[in-house]
Amino acid sequence: MTAMSDVTVLLLTFFMLTSTFLPLEPVRVTAPASVLEFKVPEYNVINILVDLQGKVFVSIDRPEVRMEALEKMSAEYGVTLNDRQKKAFMLQPFIGVPMNRLPAFLDLPLRDQDEAMRQYGIPSDSTDNQFINWVRKARETDNEMTITIKADQSTPYPLIETVMKDLVKIKANRYSLITVLRGAPEGF
């Protein structure tokens, strides 16, 4: 019995140390179900999250690409960030505020940033489409990045279609839609 409990503790420790945790998402979405099983890469990915109201959030998983995109966006929009704000930007897994609000957002304590981000989302309207610019800047740094889109199953299709059309505008025509796996129907 002692040997079995030792093995159990060793296995538990091994799994705890080797597991990777999912980043905290700014909004909770329940992805639609599908029967297609295709594993989305875990590295070198631009994750796009669309909530029920159509607010868009972007996550760039590679730190060097993320920082390069931030530098390019700051230069384009005339936003100046200090070193502390840049460090805070790297701690936040998702980008979800307009560029003009980014310095004030990064000055907030980390626990308040999540709540503030839910209010905004990245502007993706026709007059100031910062969403396209974030994706474009990330892909300029590394064109091989995989793009994924995750939206709630109740999100109206026109909101998701807008995001997909924005990606087509910058010739990012290959992307994956994230779903949850369900059993295939009988006879499939």
Image (cartoon, rainbow, N blue to C red):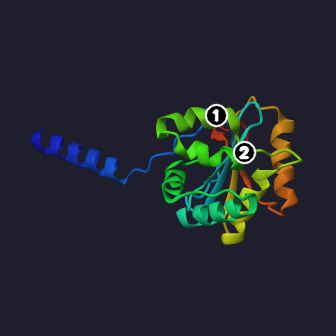
Q: Are marks 1 and 2 in contact (CB under 8 Å)?
A: no
Disc 1 packing (10 Å; few <14; some 14–19; many ≥20): some
The reply to whether residue 142 is in sight is: no
Q: Secondary structure at mark 2?
A: loop
Q: Nearer the viewer, residue 124 or 163?
A: 124
On the image, numbered disc 2 is attached to which residue?
A: 122
Q: Position of residue 177 (x, y in %)?
A: 72, 47
Q: Quarter-wise, where is residue 186 in the image? A: top right
| 1 versus 72 height, above or below | above
Per the image, label 1 sits on a secondary structure element best described as helix
Q: Position of residue 129 (x, y in %)?
A: 82, 50
The residue under the point 26% across, 47% down is: 13
How far across and how far down the image is residue 57, in percent? 68, 44
- Which part of the image, by quadrant, shows the N terminus? top left
The answer to whether residue 169 is seen in the rendering is yes
Q: Which residue is mark 1?
A: 118
Residue at image location 83% in from the left, 49% down from the top: 128
Horizontal side of 135 relative to 37 (left or right) equals right
Q: Amino acid at mark 2?
A: Ile
Up/down of 123 relative to 41, above or below: above
> In the image, residue 63 lies at what x, y percent?
53, 62
The amino acid sitting under disc 1 is Arg
